[in-house]
Amino acid sequence: MNVLFLVNNTKISPNANGGASVYFSHLQLLTKLNYNVHILMVDFSDTPIAEISSNVNPEYIQEIEGFYSEINHFQVAQIHPKGIINRIKTAISTPEKFEYFFVNSQSKKTLKQYISIHNIDLVWAEWRWTAILAYYSNLKVPIVYAHHDWEFKLRKLKSSLSFLEKFHLKQKKRVELELVKNVSACVSASFTEMQEIKAYGNPKALYIPLTYEEVEITKNDMKTPTIVHLGGMGTTANRLGLERFLEVCWNDLKQQIPNVTLKVIGNLKYASNSLKNRLKDPQIKCVGFVEDLKGELKAYDIHIIPWEYNTGTRTRIPLVFNYAQVLVCTKAAASCYPEVIHDENSILSDNLQHMTTQLVDLYKNQEKRIFIGDNARKTFQNYFTVEKQVEKLEEFLEIINVVL
């Protein structure tokens, strides 16, 4: 089967960031199924001409050699509407064109030509924009939308929205819901969002958790654990979650555990000024972005995920389990993974105040840390590898083709 893998023009890697990890995991699964995979790296930068070329950034694809038969750069056309009256009409009748200027005849024609020339049987669209591009191009082949998150949910978390922002949010929600209802199928790395997709009207939705290659565990000779937070500040959940942790938990932790240390791994470029100031604490070590995590993620250290909402996929959780670290996470953030079980392979918190108490107890209990870390590693081996998920995906895609 010829599969077209539509993905944002960015790095595909298990080590770069959460989105890149999902791209890599899905691409690896499709490769394991021996499909003939064509990749289009979709560039949404503002230009009026749509074009497909071989001009692919080599840094973006250096870790996926052997995963595809052909790869190209797809520059979509961004056509800006003219005239306020036309803009209002578009908002009412075609919200996809009102919100996304890449939805136009030129982008559509270019994509359709590629699909025809290469005899594509199935389009796999990663993340929201590529799926919008594929769906509104009225393709004659099945489209699988690899769903990452709900934009309208994330935007609602913003403290205050202007009237115009609320209007755009409503329009984008219209597009998102039409998209998930009408694509051939959806795949999500979040169990709860898979259920939501079904509730919104598409029964052909599959939960496929994020997969990683199994790593060799790094031994930990320290008598006391380090608390670890992993993830770049360009991701909302990482940035706001860490800031809330430092605001709510950190001072209490230092009072109860005077020698406690926090290691923050990830790019701080998008951290707020208030967060940067909090990170100047001498008991916090910021190591920046680390591509090879083996030296940083040691078994039985405590790994926190203080995000307080059930949004998207916490791509770090399988990674934490892979390294036999002790996950301490809010129940809301962990709800995307049914494999995460409190007091068996993780410690789940009702809220951040509760997390503080749990961290103090866990810090003093080496036996429990080892028990949780060992079970986390077993859970990874049982659920979060390509070998454990590839058959499920194959059966799902076969059913889609039969139904269609």
Image (spheres, rainbow, N blue to C red):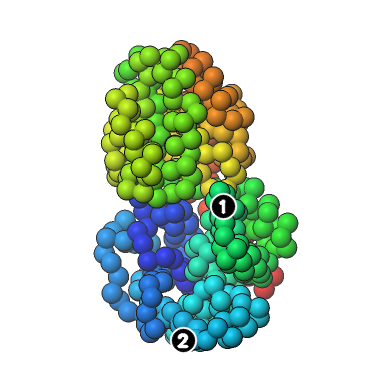
Pointer 1 local density, CA inside 10 Å: few below 14, some 14–19, many at least 20: few
Which x, y percent locates residue 158?
54, 51
Q: 77 or 225, which is in the foreground?
A: 77
Left of 131 or right of it: where is 44? left
Element type where label 1 sits in the image: loop
In the picture, residue 276 is in which quadrant? top left
Per the rendering, the mark at residue 106 is: 2
123 w.r.t. 161: above or below: below
Pointer 2 local density, CA inside 10 Å: few below 14, some 14–19, many at least 20: some
Which x, y percent locates residue 220?
33, 22
At label 1, which amino acid type do we have?
A: Ser
**Residue at image location 53% in from the left, 53% down from the top:** 390
In the picture, residue 274 is in which quadrant? top left
**Residue at image location 49% in from the left, 86% down from the top:** 82
At label 2, which amino acid type do we have?
A: Gln
Q: Quadrant of the C terminus?
A: bottom right
* Residue at the spot of label 1: 160
Left of 270 or right of it: where is 148? right
Instruction: Report if residue 376 is visible in the image.
Output: no
Element type where label 2 sits in the image: helix
